[in-house]
Amino acid sequence: MVTLGVMNMHTPLAEKAIPFAIPENNWDASEASNMSESELLLYRSNLLGADLTVTNFGGGNTSAKVMERDPLTGEEVEVLWVKGSGGDIGSMGLDGFSTLYQEKLLALESHYSGDEDDDKMVGFLPHCTFNLNGRAASIDTPLHSLLPSKHIDHVHPDAIIALAASSGGEAATRELWGEEIGWLPWKRPGFTLGVQIRDFAKANPNAKGAMLAGHGIICWADTAKDCYDQTVRLIAEAAEYLNGKLESAPAFGGAVTGAREDRAEIAAGLMPRLRGLMIGDRRKVGHFSDDAATMEFVGSKDFHRLAELGTSCPDHFLRTKIAPLTLDADRLEDDAYLAQSISDYRAMYGAYYDRCKRDNSPAVRDANPVVVLVPGVGRMTFAKDKATARIAGEFYLNAINVMRGAEAVGDYIALDEQEAFDIEYWLLEEAKLQRMPAPKEMVGKVALVTGGAGGIGAAVARRMLQDGACVMLADRDEGSVETVHGDLAKAFGADVVRSVKCDVTDEAQVAAAVAECAREFGGIDVLVANAGIASSAPISETTTELWDKNFDVLSKGYFLTAKHAWPLMEGMADMGGTSIVFIGSKNAVAAAKNASAYASAKAAANHLARCLALEGADSGIRVNVVNPDAVIRGSRIWDGDWRQERAGAHGIDSGDELEEHYRQRSMLKRSVLPDDIAEATYWFASEASAKSTGNMINVDAGNAQAFTR
């Protein structure tokens, strides 16, 4: 069990509610001056989506009705450009928009007889595609096609949803905007909602938009700039209005629990234990946040009352489940309490499914919590991969902001349970999930790689990342490991790779690196002990300092990393177990001239692996060794004196000839590269070797002396 640490003093309780941010108008007339209508739509969309006070990741949609030449008839026709299914308006390009014949979209109403036809109407949208555009149209398309206005924005900013999800929201909307902005009751997105908005706009010709209860705002204008200006203005006015209300009273009934100073340490100890309890088809990856808004919420008087209500906006709910799991901060060291809490949550979710399911509902999905909240500690989210966990956390932060604002003008109103279920288990959503490709082999797994800045370490990390793992790079060379981190982040995304400075001979640094991995990703599934040095000297010239240095790094370092990763890895036995891989050496099994310190330390590490294989079997921890030989290219070890020393030991004049010497010495006459070691390491880390422990693989192009016996 990971020790959580001693309770430190609490930080002061917040005296004032955190205000809503005011969006800025970032339209640049000179930049937009020569853009086409479709380019202006993209420009407007990117501006809106890049500002998280305007919309959240993947949320919102924008449109423009553009005259285009029909490639079939050559005639000018009106085409609806609207954000397609999926994607993010802040980062999308023109290929992120669906394009549809507006005339055909309007003709679809002949197939509509009421809200029971909403799902059916989605099936007609592909028949309206313009110019063979492969981007699928979203369910929100009717909200844009049925309105006659040329430019439409539909966004879900926190300040707006706070009004839309409050018992006082309709009155506040009238107070703020009078007849300019209307109010429509909750309706799930689809054709029926589009008809309702269209009919409202027709009956209220002076209106410029409408609040959609529990959902967001939709507004329209005749030009791209006017639409953008209006959207930003309305959000700013809502934020300023709510900020005025928040000044008069503390948020969430006031603070009762301060933020613990040791909350990061607590999260590092808690997340692997929770993750180990979340059994299912695949492992979870975690994300931790202790931002100011979260700490204000979890430390408040109304925390439990509001958390139990769940979220309001469909965008929030789909990412965060019906409700979060809340934990008692005074019982976090009680494993039985944590296990019961997860079990109770799963039972709650199962009961929710049974109450709300319909005859044709998809089978119940993963019942584990996505969001875990702890007073004084913060917010933890768990999902199939790091990006999904992070984004779920961000959506719950949006929900916190919404609750704060909603309570400032009335009572917060969560999404009706049956409505929430119908969205979560919507058959169209299920069909989309079924079309998604199967996840890669290592998705959901977390690897800690020591010596991560070196050639072998970087190659191992890259191989893990290629198949979907999250990787923490640890290395004593802070500059070099940050460089490797940056390169891998560019190749695989910033979410999945982290780095930490760590000298494996320093137990405190090793413990800190393991804790950092736990806090960043939720645990450790694969430990690759790779940090190394090399030295060459005859026994008469081998000092005790040189001997100790080799054993400190190559034996003690492997012991320390395994020791501190071990408690995190024990907890995953029910999820298929975990894997430790030591990067050994041919010299661990074959004697080497003038390298007694290095070879002996490597041999000690190899035997440690065998001992740990015995010790870890009952906990599902597999321990294996990869023995390389002469991995010269890309190696920092071979860049130093070791190259010249080994050249001298083999009677070679120049270190530059050493790689050819080793190639010719091998049975297969081939050079051994970092990628070769990475492939063997990956095999031991993967399920392909699930029944292998206590073993060694030599990756040396063939060396009879190193044959295992």
Image (cartoon, rainbow, N blue to C red):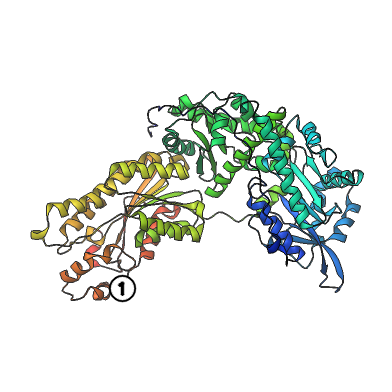
Residue sitting at x 78%, y 40%: 212
Report the quarter where the C terminus lies: bottom left
Q: Is residue 409 left or right of residue 260?
A: right
Q: Place residue 597 in its image quadrant.
A: bottom left
Q: Nearer the viewer, residue 65 or 703?
A: 65
Residue that mark 1 sits on: 668
Task: Give the number of callouts.
Answer: 1
Q: Position of residue 250 (x, y in %)?
A: 61, 26
Q: Amino acid at mark 1?
A: Leu
Residue 264 seen: yes
Q: Position of residue 477 (x, y in %)?
A: 33, 55
Residue sitting at x 56%, y 29%: 344
Q: Nearer the viewer, residue 592 or 376?
A: 376
Q: Is residue 362 above or below residue 533?
A: above
Q: Nearer the viewer, residue 66 or 84?
A: 66
Q: Position of residue 13 (x, y in %)?
A: 51, 27
How crowded pointer 1 is (Cα within 10 Å; few <14, some 14-19, many 20+) is rated as few
Q: Is residue 264 left or right of residue 407?
A: left
Q: Place residue 664 in its image quadrant.
A: bottom left
Report the quarter where the N terminus lies: top left
